Amino acid sequence: MSRTILALVLAGSLLGLAAPQAALAAGDAPPPPRQKWTFSGPFGKFDRAQLQRGLKVYREVCAVCHGLKYIAFRNLADLGYSEAQVKAIAAEYKIKDGPNDQGEMFERDGRPADYFPTPWANENAARAQYNGVPPDMSVLAKARGYERGFPWFIFDMFTQFQEHGVDYIHALLVGYKEKPPTGFTLPQGASYNEYFPGHAIAMPPPLSDKRVDYTDGSPATTDQYAKDVAAFMMWTAEPHMEARKRIGFQVMIFLLIFAGLLYFTKKKVWADAH
Amino acid sequence: MSGHPNDALGPKAWPFNLKTDSGAPYEIPSYRPTNPVLRWLEYRLPLLSFAYSTAVSYPTPRNLNYWWTFGGILTFLLGAQIVTGIILVMHYTPHADMAFNSVEHIMRDVNYGWLLRYLHSNGASMFFVAVYIHMARGMYYGSYKEPREVLWILGVILYLLMMATGFLGYTLPWGQMSFWGATVITNFFSAIPLVGESVVSWLWGGYAIGNPTLQRFFSLHYLLPFVIVGVVVLHVWALHMVGQNNPTGVEPKTEKDTVAFTPYATIKDSFMMVCFCIVYAWFVFYVPNYLGHADNYIPANPAVTPTHIVPEWYYLPFYAILRAIPNKLLGVIALFGSIGILAFLPWLDTSRVRSANYRPLFRQFFWIFILVTVGLGWLGSKPAEGGYIIAARILTFYYFAHFLIILPVLGWVEKTKPLPNSISESILTPNRSAN
């Protein structure tokens, strides 16, 4: 058995380049710089304009390789789009449907109930085309992170820091280096990234300044694109985050008052027992 | 309450040995329905009087501190886990190709599905937080000592069942840590000489971890909580036979040493339960993935091994013990031994004094033991290499030495402090009181 495991481990590490799935940044990568996010903290909310920009970056850049299979077009209403806008976005996609009455598959325009189509037919097709399987982006913001180490991970429990994933994604997107440091041999077809575990990443630098047109006056820079798409990915990974934090606050208020009432009741009940 | 059926078996068990002030046997107030319908029922099935004497008039030591509220908290958490679990099952699909998707479906499309799932996954962690406090309280106050050995052993069985249930549950989302955690844990059994490999394929239901494994794990994950409920009933039954220990470790002698379960214990338990819920809610609503692992949001992939395979935090001390031993079979034996040894605690601790409050040396060793266990937990999260391995070996040795050397010897050499004559005395003379 242990030999099978060893073989799997070896196979896994060989595939490491092709399928960059190692979630936690390895020790040799520096910790991603902390960013400011509107959705952090107990009252955090998504910035709708930022999510819309992130969606634009996804659709114009990331979607060439990455799927977003858990997001339906109807979900985009959460980003502040009207029903008509959602319909229009969905209609820009061709969705494979069927079989029809003749038993054949066919393509039709997307509808709000459809999900974002993955840009490749299957993993083998992706491997042949991209030198690896680009991970689906839906839950990526929760599937990535980095070790905070002692004692920081203890503080994180109280400060509610949980933006490891988005910080990492932002750092990764801006962390490409044209030339690897001397002595580092880059495998064929890989790019050098400061923040990627092992540094050799199969994804070529996806973003560059002015690549996506922003209509709201936000700077058309790699850094801004990276922030926007990372925020968008936080929303795709945790679409109910705002409701969670809002209800959480109500629950906290309730529990604190309830605990206070019980405390004084307890004192009264026990007063004659002491 | 004279004429207890067990009289012939020896000294009367708690609370049948309680006396009133005048020295007469104390009788627990019992329920006497006046409503004719309830009287009709009472004659045929004395359900209400049973509930009354176990949950209302049942006498509890009056000096119990807040560490005694975790039994109630655990009961609440068991109920919460079962309720959230049953609802999650209505939306979850136990299939290797669909499990991950169905969990995402719960998180996105099921009304308050995210809440149910986060309550359930963090509830498991809270369950272990509460059980570790509950166990540490038992160890500190010597609650496992005569006549509470069976009560304690039932607790150890419950702890083992919880560990199994937690592990099985963690595999269900079928993420990378689910898959590889299951691989590592089931591989323990391959250490068994001769039949190890066969046992592992029998557990897997095939030659690799796959859909049959997931489905049986799901089935068992649904079954075990109800087994836990059954053992909890025995645990509470045993508790009601021998009564609660208390911070002095001196048995209640008269009615004055006790208060009725309701309202005294109920209100105290409720207050603490709500305080515990604040912590629980903090995790659920604000840091729901803090206690999980990012890799488990990557769908299971047999071809890619995570860089570090780490079990859930509550197994980490035992994981460290496993990896501290260079030989696989011995490592697995040490792992199970480290939990199994708890069952022998009533006989390994040779001191006749229960509470650490009157055992100055034991008290220090107790805290060292807690630190060692936390240290093992930290080492369990680190890669098994270099200094970490050496530290884990030292702490593993100490862990076993605590039970096998320190506790037996302490009982002989330790000079304990004088015990109060009764619980009421310990309350009236606070300088000698327990705390």
Image (cartoon, coloured by chain):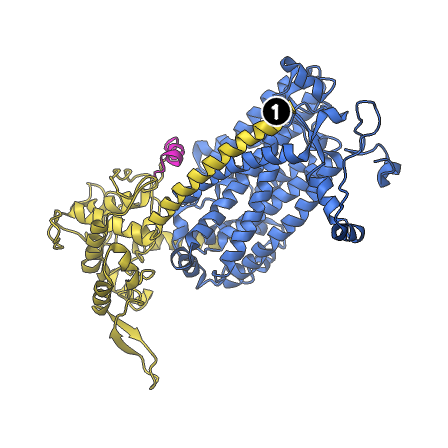
- In front of the other: A183 or A28: A28
Dividing the image into 4 quarters, which one contains the C terminus of chain B?
top right
Query: In this picture, is B281 found above or below A274?
Result: below
Dividing the image into 4 quarters, which one contains the N terminus of chain B?
top right
Q: Residue at x 36, y 49 (%)?
A: A243
Asked where in the image residue B369 lies, by quadrant, the reply is top right
Query: In this picture, is A118 found above or below A186?
Result: below
The residue that label 1 is drawn on is A271
Q: Across the whole image, how many numbered discs are drawn on residues? A: 1
Q: Position of residue B180 (x, y in %)?
A: 46, 52
Q: Position of residue A83 (x, y in %)?
A: 25, 63
Amino acid at circle 1: Ala
Q: Residue at x 49, y 49 (%)?
A: B120
What kind of element bears circle 1? helix
Q: Residue at x 29, y 44 (%)?
A: A39
> Which region of the structure is painted magenta?
A149-161
Is A111 included in the stretch rendered in magenta? no
Q: Along the horizontal axis of the image, is B314 left or right of B361?
A: left
Residue B119 is at least partly visible in this image = yes
Chain letter, colour yellow = A
- In front of the other: B173 or B83: B83
Q: Residue at x 25, y 38 (%)?
A: A33
Q: Which secondary structure type mostly characterizes the magenta part of the structure?
A: helix
Q: Which colour denotes chain B?
A: blue
Is A151 included in the stretch rendered in magenta? yes
